[in-house]
Image (cartoon, grey):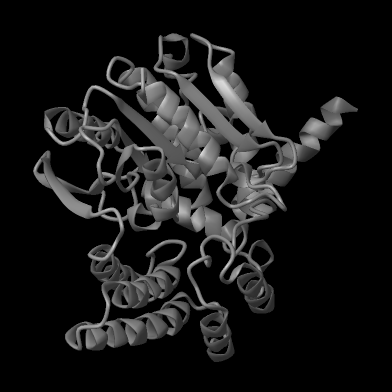
């Protein structure tokens, strides 16, 4: 019986690979997306910074899931907020009022490029969102410095923030996954600021302003370049650095815990892949019938990861992904910096088994697994900041030593 199940499973996977990764049944319908947007509007990622009335206006105007139509509808709202913010700034309005308008402008254009800037319209929305974010950042409670450093003939761009009154504090380099870029890290960094940690938000390889793709040999070196930079600064303690990677970006936090073991005090691996999540057995279902929490459905998850990896099809991705395995690379049995694995047991984008494989090798690791949690550990009914608060406490403890 097990033999025939294996045969059937192989046949199904083969059929899935032979079909287009953008089949209609792999994507949510327009009506399903509209319903999900309204469920999340003003409440949860990526719509927690969106006003419900603006979401309603956009959803009345769009007639399809065409990516450029989506981008324009949201960015039109963002541009209107930006223009209003510019006008009030000229009139001498309060920084808080102006900042709120720019933040609304950013959030709407960010949703316009979400989940990935894969078309001309989405790329335009992304460029505008960065401009609006930086206008908003001028009014942040914790000042934001735009840091640019040279990297192998190109440049890296990050956002450094140091809490008021903190004297040479420890610093956490943090990043998201294929759809959450450095401009989207403010909820996470505010939690870190509250416990006295400085933050450097960067883009994961293959996203935002990072000049390397996810699978490039140079991708790992972008993080080492940031560690080099922080070690030379006088306003943060470059000897006490932690990293926090989320979703598809969590892989880099785990990898850095090994390759930068001597320079990191702690690494948070939240909702990511280490070995099993890079294998065909996991990826084919994730890209076809999975992605329950992904706004547009599984095909969109594949599109976003392809964009980060520089691959074009599911077959291309399945060929490239196993090369990233931390087990097959031999890293897992090497000494590592302290690692905290975090995820939901029900995650269908990244297998919780990848936390277990980290714990089964090398020096002891720590973990927090949420039995009813989905991607990143998010659990129905749980406060939005519950998991970030737990992570911030762990990082504070590790970086205070």
Task: Report x, y in % for residue 191.
Answer: 44, 45
Give left or right: position of 214 versus 191: left
Determine which quarter of the picture holds residue 192: top left
In the picture as drawn, the residue positioned furthest to the right comes out as 1
Position of the C terminus by quadrant: top left
Task: Pick the residue in front: 263 or 164.
Answer: 164
Quick one: 120 or 340, which is closer to the camera? Answer: 340
Q: Classify the position of the N terminus by image quarter.
A: top right
Residue 202 placement (x, y as % from top left):
30, 46
Query: Percent x, y for residue 70?
Result: 47, 78
Q: Is residue 298 left or right of residue 81?
A: right
Front residue of 306 and 372: 372
Residue at the spot 52% in from the left edge and 53% down from the top edge = 302
Of residues 33 and 29, the one nearer the viewer is 33
In the displayed structure image, the side of residue 85 where residue 372 appears, left or right: right
Q: Is residue 329 above or below residue 104?
A: above
> How far across and how far down the image is residue 320, in percent?
44, 37
222 in relation to 114, above or below? above
In the shown orientation, is residue 25 left or right of residue 310? Answer: right
Residue plotted at (30% across, 66% down): 133
**In the figure, 319 relative to 39: above or below?**
above
């Amino acid at each position: 019986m097990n033999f025939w199940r294996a045969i059937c499973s192989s046949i199904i996977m083969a059929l899935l690979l032979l079909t287009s990764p953008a089949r209609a049944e792999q994507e949510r319908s327009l009506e399903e997306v509209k319903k999900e947007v309204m469920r999340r509007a003003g409440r949860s990622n990526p719509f927690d910074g969106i006003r419900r009335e603006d979401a309603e206006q956009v959803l009345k105007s769009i007639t399809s899931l065409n990516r450029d139509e989506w981008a324009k509808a949201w960015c039109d709202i963002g541009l209107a907020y930006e223009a209003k913010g510019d006008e009030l700034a000229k009139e001498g309005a309060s920084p808080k009022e102006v900042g709120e308008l720019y933040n609304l402008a950013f959030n709407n254009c960010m949703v316009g490029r979400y989940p990935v800037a894969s078309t001309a319209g989405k790329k335009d929305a992304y460029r505008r969102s960065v401009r609006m974010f930086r206008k908003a950042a001028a009014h942040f409670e914790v000042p934001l410095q735009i840091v640019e450093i040279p990297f192998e003939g190109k440049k890296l761009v990050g956002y450094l923030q140091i809490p008021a009154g903190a004297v040479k504090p420890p610093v956490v380099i943090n990043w998201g996954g294929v759809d959450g870029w450095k401009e989207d890290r403010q909820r996470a960094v505010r939690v870190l600021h509250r416990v006295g940690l400085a933050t450097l938000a960067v883009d994961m390889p293959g996203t935002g302003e990072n000049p390397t793709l996810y699978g490039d040999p140079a991708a790992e070196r972008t993080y080492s370049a940031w560690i080099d930079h922080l070690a030379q600064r006088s306003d943060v303690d470059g000897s006490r650095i932690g990293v926090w990677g989320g979703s598809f970006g969590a892989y880099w936090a785990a990898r850095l815990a090994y390759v930068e073991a001597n320079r990191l005090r702690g690494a948070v691996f939240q909702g990511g892949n280490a070995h099993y999540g890079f294998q065909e057995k996991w990826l084919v279902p994730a890209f076809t019938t999975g992605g329950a929490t992904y706004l547009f459905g599984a095909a969109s998850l594949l599109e976003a990861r392809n964009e980060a990896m520089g691959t074009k099809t599911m077959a291309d991705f399945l060929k490239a992904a196993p090369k990233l395995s931390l087990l097959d690379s031999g890293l897992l049995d090497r000494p590592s910096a302290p690692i905290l694995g975090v995820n939901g047991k029900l995650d269908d984008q990244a297998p919780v088994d990848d936390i277990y494989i980290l714990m089964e090798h090398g020096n002891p690791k720590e973990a927090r697994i949420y039995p009813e949690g989905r991607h990143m550990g998010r659990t129905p009914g749980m406060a939005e900041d519950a998991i970030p608060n737990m992570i911030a406490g762990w990082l504070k403890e590790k970086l205070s030593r």
